[in-house]
Amino acid sequence: MGRSMNLKHRIPLVVLSTFVMIAAILFFAGRIYAAGNSESTEQFATATLGVLTGTTCGTDAEKSFPEANIKYFNTLADLLEVLRSGKVDAMIMDQGTTRYLQIENDDLKMVGDVLSAIDMAPAFPKTEKGRELCEKYSEFTRKICEDGTLEEIDGIWFGRDESLRTVLDYENLPDTNGTLTIAVDASLPPFAYMKDRNVVGYDVDIAARFCEEYGYRLKVSNMSFDSILAAVETAKCDLASCGITVTEERAESMLFGEPVFKSGNIVVVSDGESAASSGGGNDNEENLSFAESIKQSFEKTFIREDRWLLFVKGIVNTLIITLLSILLGTALGFGVFMACRNGNPVANGITRVSMWLVQGMPMVVLLMVLYYIVFSKVDIAGIFVAVAGFTLTFGATVFGLLKMGVGAVDKGQYEASCALGFSDRDTFFQIILPQALPHITTAYRGEIISLIKATSVVGYIAVQDLTKMGDIVRSRTYEAFFPLIAVTVIYFVLEELLARMAGRIEVGFNPKRRTREEILKGVNTHDKN
Amino acid sequence: MIKIEHLQKKYSNVTPLKDVSTEINDGDVISVIGPSGTGKSTLLRCINMLEKPTAGRIWVDGEEITDPSCDIRKIRQKMGMVFQSFNLFGHMTVIENIMLAPVKLLGKSRQEAYDKGMELLHMVGLAQKEMNYPDELSGGQKQRIAIARTLAMDPEVILLDEPTSALDPTMVGEVQSVIEELAGSGKTMMIVTHEMAFARAICNRVFFMDEGGIYEDGTPEEIFEHPVRENTQRFIWKSKILEFDIKSSNYDFRALFGEIDNFCLKNRTALKMSNHIRLVVEEMVIQLMLPVLEDPDINVTIEYSAVKENSKVTVKSNGHAFDGLRIENDLAVSVLKGIISDFHYERLDEGELRNLIIVELK
């Protein structure tokens, strides 16, 4: 691909790759636990290091390389992209993930010793129920560890045979003892990731086997890693398991079971020479023309494993959230406006405070507050919480627009209508509102567009919208740009569609577009003219 | 028809109406005139409750509209209002503006409302504008439509709040002619206006408003020809006033004469008039009064009427009673002979300044 050409001219990478070569040789000699080679990580003391947000890698990086410039990234795909493009010199990653990445990415090499040995374990809420489940789960973990099942699972998910990587049909297990909800971030292969529209992975495999044995049905709730920890703390799920590192700090707010995976964070670099063969495993990729590489990206992003279905699901979710929020938000804004219109001091006071709260809060924070605090005790799908959150903000916007539009109508219009004998209500609906609407329809349309874009943060509360689906696909293809641009194009199309719909309404609100026949419906004018 | 008792309207900073009581009879066409800020519009707006009175009571057709239980909407339906700023509904065509209220409020069929609307549009001369929107019309046309809209409700009373004040002078005539025609139709009307000639021509009764109420109430002849009270006279005659007090014989008369010159200049009196006023003040105050007053306290008011083109000098002073006849004779024999058109002396019964002299100048 085009970017790999540029890479070759990056001198630091060339230098780095020399070290990486050596590291690679040593690595292949000793496999993972033999990482204690003579290769030194001193060269990274002042380098730029990339880590994944919400993992322990950041802490380890800070401890081991206090002078280094540490950069945080949200997805593995992003991290790999910056590593390959030289924006970071190395990344800190746990060995497990790295091992998996190496299956498809020959360019990745581990360097030096593990920075810290880490255990990965499922996390449970600190509740009665959580404690009980934790014990059962730990017992199960110990059992499969002893009888060799765990090793077998390791072989499946870290092996090279793709066909072996399947899990039980956990959604249709008999729910003798009920259903367990497991929170995962399905962008962390091999622990948890999307495959053929299902969430699979090392951790999911264990969880499914556990459920089968103990008579549970399993429900997977896919959310961003940041949100998982919050979901466990607030008992929004029964357990969370997707390569979660055990730390003392985390143990304060959640319960960790028996570790299911032993690993360690280690420095990983990319060997620029073989970077080009990343992803598809196509050796001739370098020689592909631009059009062919686009075609290949398209195939990977949309066709393979029927990933287009993920996008469709994402679009549907984004549209549901947007449309419902527009409808409910408009109704809410209008209702509140009507309640406040005649200067009721109580209604006005409440409105002022709520507007201040809702509009002042970053959307992500508002959604997380709603999901993890306000609705923490209610079993409610994230998508409805998203609708609630966006209804609130859109309602506040509509309220503001109405206030502006009605304020723009001359006071004399109100007086003239009252003087004719119309009631306050009739005056508002027949005289004021029709004249206020044209003032605000353009702004309203703009707000709808903003709303669609704003919904892209709902991934934080376990809703798989278009953006989240894009991230999921990226976490599988490790392509930074194509899925992003594809998502952007889809957003453009959605925006255009909604804008056109709103435009239709706008035209409908314009009284001057009516014809003479419409205006004089039911009136015979011939005798007069 | 309309009875008002002790009506008061107070705002936090001003009180335009202090105490108004009056009765308006069926068929009265009343012009409400007076200086600005005297509550003319407020009075009109209180009558249809667009302004809520602070105190007092108003009855329309025997029904008390200031009673909170009264359905003011029903009253408003028979009381049309025409505004200074027209207030046509911007999102509707001319004919819709006229049809709206009869259809929605009186339950008329659209056909009926349309026919009546077109009839009214013919009357105000704008039948061809039925499909236009208000912002496509001139000010005069808008106001004629507004009048037609009011008439469509067939009101018993029509309140017109400065209907021509917002208009270009060239458009005042077309609106006035419509109102004039209306005034002849026998409907009860109240019109706030600054156009004196027009007010006089159409009404049978005039309210002159000042000092927070109806200051003088009379027929057009009474108010416009022979106003009785001081403020009415000043308003009708467009009088301008200069007032000063002289409390010492060392008073700076040079400065005073300068002020008189300025006053005359500003009000564009004839040069002759300016000289005459100075003469009168000089003669009366300096020559006649100051020499005989031990501790002078003289109040002089100069009033110039642009309408009558005459001036009036009123002098009040302390001290003994003057010999009225002697003053007149003295004045007459001296320089003032021929410029005074009227002279009046009076000894008042009470107050500090009991000598009152009024001189009128041509």
Image (cartoon, coloured by chain):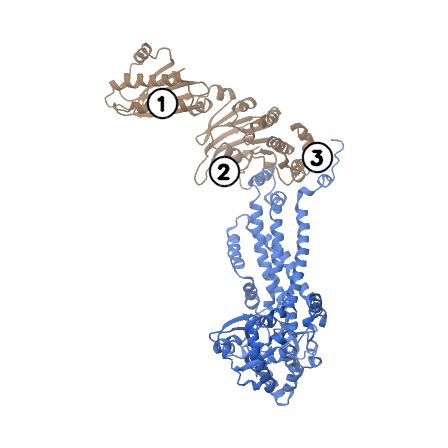
- Residue A190 image label: none
Q: Quadrant of residue A517?
A: top right
Quarter of the picture containing the C terminus of chain A is top right
- x, y percent for residue A248: 50, 79
Under mark 3, the amino acid is Tyr
Q: Residues within 10 Å of mark 2 (few under 14, many from 20)?
A: many
Chain-order first, disc 2 or disc 1: 2
Q: Is residue A87 visible?
A: yes
The residue sitting at the bottom extreme is A147
From the viewer's perspective, is the residue at label 1 or at label 3 nearer?
1
SS type, badge 3? helix
Chain in brown on the image: B
Colour of chain A in the rendered structure image: blue
Q: Quadrant of residue A414?
A: top right
At a point 71% along the width and 80% down the height, the residue shown is A163
Residue underneath mark 1: B260
The residue sitting at the left extreme is B294
Residue underneath mark 3: B114
At a point 55% along the width and 45% down the height, the residue shown is A407
User: What chain does badge 3 belong to?
Assistant: B
- x, y percent for residue A488: 64, 62
Under mark 2, the amino acid is Pro
The residue sitting at the top extreme is B333
Residue underneath mark 2: B53
